[in-house]
Amino acid sequence: MTVEPDTKDWTWVIDRPCPECGFDASALSLSDVPAAIRANADGWPEVLGRPNVRERPDPATWSPLEYACHVRDACRVFGRRLTMMLAQDDPLFPNWDQDATAVESRYGEQDPLEVAAELRRNADGLAAAFAAVHGDLWRRTGRRSNGSVFTVETLARYFVHDPVHHLHDVGG
């Protein structure tokens, strides 16, 4: 059974705390972005080692394994978006249908140990990419296919919330 796609616009998390997970992206120092990404990645191996990692809490909610796959892939997608923003003027990001990716990539059937290693690798790569951003580069812009405009700074804040929220979702 597939999970109902999340169609909410989560860009509000850039400016105010998330009432569900408690994370306040607006309070995150830009110099702390790489460490926040790496710290989140540190929490996933324990989650992925659980015996029930493939079990969904209910039919409408991803399993911990599916959430981890999403976080792994989000690190990769946001790394590409950051690269585009730093190399191009106001790029339009290719659309990423995270729900279609979950089905097509069979998230629930993947090897948890491989997912943990890939998540760590992707998170470290994204953290290093954000660590290399300085000065005016934080103000460079890019756009999502739905019209949402990001600066590198707001992209970083928006991104960090996502894996923090999902680790919260799985009780990590």
Image (tube, rainbow, N blue to C red):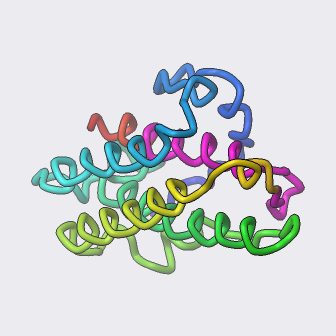
| Residue 98 place in picture, x, y as percent | 58, 64
**69 left or right of 89?**
left
Would you place residue 77 above or below residue 140 in this image? below
Determine the residue positioned at 40% across, 54% down.
67
Q: Nearer the viewer, residue 123 or 89?
A: 89
Determine the residue positioned at 82% across, 56% down.
141
Total marks shown come to 0
Determine the residue positioned at 50% across, 80% down.
104
Determine the residue positioned at 42% across, 67% down.
125
**138 left or right of 38?**
right
Q: Nearer the viewer, residue 7 or 60?
A: 7
| Residue 168 place in picture, x, y as percent | 37, 34
Q: Is residue 112 magenta?
A: no
| Residue 17 place in picture, x, y as percent | 59, 21
The range drawn in magenta is 141-165
**93 left or right of 70?**
right
The image quarter containing residue 65 is bottom left
